[in-house]
Image: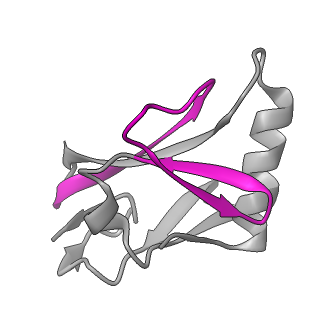
Amino acid sequence: MIQLTESAVSAISRFIDQANKPVFGLRIRVDGGGCSGFKYGMKLEEASAEEDQIIECSGVKILVDGESAPLLSGVTVDFLDGLEGSGFKFENPNATESCNCGKSFAG
């Protein structure tokens, strides 16, 4: 379903290690908005919700709600760190359009 690059796993693990509270996993979701219609959201979670799908990726637990799951199927998450800034980038085969920021898309 969701793939994480080595760079993304490293960044997520670093954020989990630096968290001030226990972390169960990383929630990845899709919300309405952004410059292309949908936007990605990420948040460290202390627990999963009953309806969550839990995906294990290289030791990182990814939590996905039922509404976001179809839009995230096949997504690869990468973490880029460069002169122009750092952040997560999503490659989504379900997107019919995406913006240059890599954080929003149209389905």
- Which color mode does the image show? one colour
User: With respect to residue 33, does 102 lie above or below?
Assistant: below
User: With respect to residue 65, does 48 lie above or below?
Assistant: above
User: With respect to residue 63, does 103 lie above or below?
Assistant: below
Q: Residue at x 80, y 58 (%)?
A: 59
Q: Residue at x 77, y 24 (%)?
A: 19
Q: Nearer the viewer, residue 93 or 105?
A: 93
Say if residue 92 shows up in the picture.
Answer: yes
Q: Residue at x 37, y 48 (%)?
A: 29
Question: Residue 92: x and y, percent?
Answer: 37, 76
Asked if residue 5 lies left or right of residue 66, the reply is: right
Asked if residue 21 lies left or right of residue 79, the reply is: right
Task: Tell me the quarter of the picture where residue 99 sits.
Answer: bottom left
Q: Residue at x 34, y 69 (%)?
A: 100
Question: Residue 84: x and y, percent?
Answer: 61, 59
Q: Nearer the viewer, residue 82 or 92?
A: 92
Give the overall secondary structure of the magenta segment.
strand
Task: Tell me the quarter of the picture where residue 55 sits.
Answer: bottom right
Asked if residue 36 lies left or right of residue 50, the reply is: left
User: With respect to residue 74, does 62 lie above or below?
Assistant: above
Count all numbered tags in the image, as a single digit.
0
Say if residue 81 shows up in the picture.
Answer: no
Asked if residue 96 lies left or right of residue 81, the reply is: left
Q: Quadrant of the C terminus?
A: bottom left
Question: Residue 33: x and y, percent?
Answer: 17, 45
Q: Say if the magenta span includes residue 1.
A: no
Question: Residue 105: x and y, percent?
Answer: 24, 66
Q: What span is in magenta?
A: 36-64
